Amino acid sequence: MQRRNVVSKTSIPDGSSSRSKTGAVRKTTKRCSMLGWAILVTGMLVLMAVVWQAITLVTVTTRRAPQESSSSWMSQHQMMNEGQQKKATEAFPKPWNIRPKALSSTNTGTMCDKKLLSRSTLDKSLALGTRFLLKHQKEAGNFDYEYDWTTDENVDDDMEVRQAGALWGLSLIFHDMMDTLPPKADIADIMDTVANLHVVAVHLLRGFEYFVMQNSHILEGDDGVVMRYITYPGSKTHGLGTVGLVTLALVDFLRATENLPDYLEYKLFNPHKRNKLQQYLRELMAFLVTSHTSVGSPNFAASNRFTMWNKMLSSASWKTWDVQMDPFKVLSEAGPEGEGGFFYPNYDDDGNSYGHASSYYDGECLLAIIKAAKYLDYNFLYPVAVGSAQALYHRHVTKALKADEDSSETKGFYQWSSMCFYELATVEFFDVQQDVDYYKPDKFGKWLVDLALWMIDVHETLSRPKNTGYAYEGIVPAWTYAASSHSTSEQTTKHLQCTIEEGLSKLITWQVGMGLVENNVEDWDGQRGLGGVQNSRHETGLRIDTTQHQMHATILTRRLVYNDEITWPWRTDILIPNQ
């Protein structure tokens, strides 16, 4: 039954009737009049409060997401009615006319004098690393967290955000494989290629099923909007970085499968699965974006998420600057200390966010938003991306380095922010010069190069005894931007290039199967740990995040530095026998 607020009508005496009464009656009437006014005003205030609450708040229902199996992909899609299907796959408003900008080198003499890497070495390393990640994915869909290849034992430890990072690593590999495919081909000539793609796609879908379908909760607003967040089994505290990395995995997978060549239609997976993954991305992205401090700082309520999300969607439908810039200004300036907002790093089972800023999680979440805005139907989030990037740079770089020139906070933010700044620096606007003038993409290119020089010269990445594969996820994009920039000196560009050659060539020797570390183990069977990357030359534990970060650095080096050979890179004799 609908609850209604009923306000009783109270008669208010007029002056003519009161003149004929006695003083006692007039006094009683006056009291009644005052009482009537009080009741009326109180009733109106209650009614206004109820109406205001109905306008500003959304009723939120929290529940565990219904578990789905891989066999239910098709049935779930068929059960969706026509309206639900349209809502799950429809494009968002796209008020910003942006596209990726291709960079070309304008610098001469950018190559380092000592070439310690080669395309063939990078190809082999990536194929072996891919084999390792595939082999160490469990049947459930998550991964062996750490494996000691000398004792053939898994280490009893786990961390949800690194698990999600491994899934993103597979998605990056799949995207790289898809990106090198010829637009036209005879299927008979590329059977090995399709077989490799199918293997990786199957493992990715298994991972999505585990993280998104089986281990997540959803928030449902009374307006039909659904938000989803990951609840990794066994975790006492849920980290937003997990949501950010699973979102990144979905973004890069959906990018890779957006325009499949005709010869791959229905060869890798049923297209209906892609529609379902688009829906999951939409739900995760809504939760991710609305985990920002601007939504509820300092008192966070899950219902505020829906108010903010709907506001962003409505703002995107307007191409007016005062409305369009609002998310940018809010996210640039909001925050408990008035220094720019951040993403709450943790959330409880009910989807309520909390915690102090984390440079790791901030970077992971920001990168997910930027890539979705740049490559998929989410460019209405571009002001959110740029505003957050500026606020987080101020917090984790400017302020942090002022307190400590070799800040661990900046180190945690480094590779994530570098990938973010590369994506923002290589956005190309067209038709609207005002957007270019306001967002200034070149500013992010300067930050990208400056941070790479900090990583090399201040943090001294080449002298670090542990694996620093993460550093090259930032240094390689920085070199690419520097080599194409008229404002970067040739000396700086060479400095970046030589660091890549020296550093990554050393790290590759810490990978099992690349010719160094396995020589120290007499009883190695040629299979245990093949492709995994050690955290140092003498540590035999192979952690999934160490391998994932180094494989991404290898992908970037192949694509951006050693890109003279655009050929199918995968060694089928290495990859296929693993299955």
Image (spheres, rainbow, N blue to C red):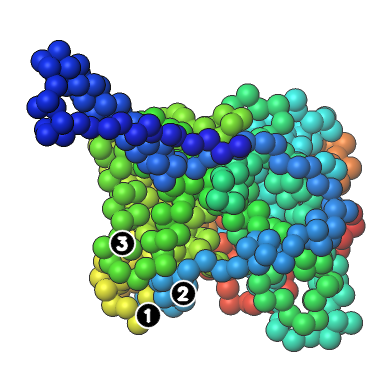
The answer to whether residue 161 is seen in the rendering is no
Residue 269's tag is none
Residue under circle 2? 99
Camera-nearest residue between 398 and 86? 86
Q: Secondary structure at mark 3?
A: helix
Amino acid type at circle 3 is Val
Q: Position of residue 255 (x, y in %)?
A: 62, 67
In the image, taking residue 352 as reference, residue 162 lies left or right, namely right
Q: Secondary structure at mark 1?
A: loop
Residue under circle 1? 430
Residue 340 in which image quadrant: top left
Q: Residue at x 41, y 71 (%)?
A: 95
Q: Secondary structure at mark 2?
A: strand
Q: Residue at x 33, y 63 (%)?
A: 324
Q: Position of residue 107 (x, y in %)?
A: 37, 75
Residue 323's tag is 3
Q: CA distance from mark 2 to mark 1?
A: 8 Å
Camera-nearest residue between 522 and 126? 126
Contact (Cβ within 8 Å) of mark 2 with mark 1: yes
Dot in front, 3 or 1: 3
Dot in front, 3 or 2: 3
Q: Earlier in the sequence, mark 2 or mark 1?
A: 2
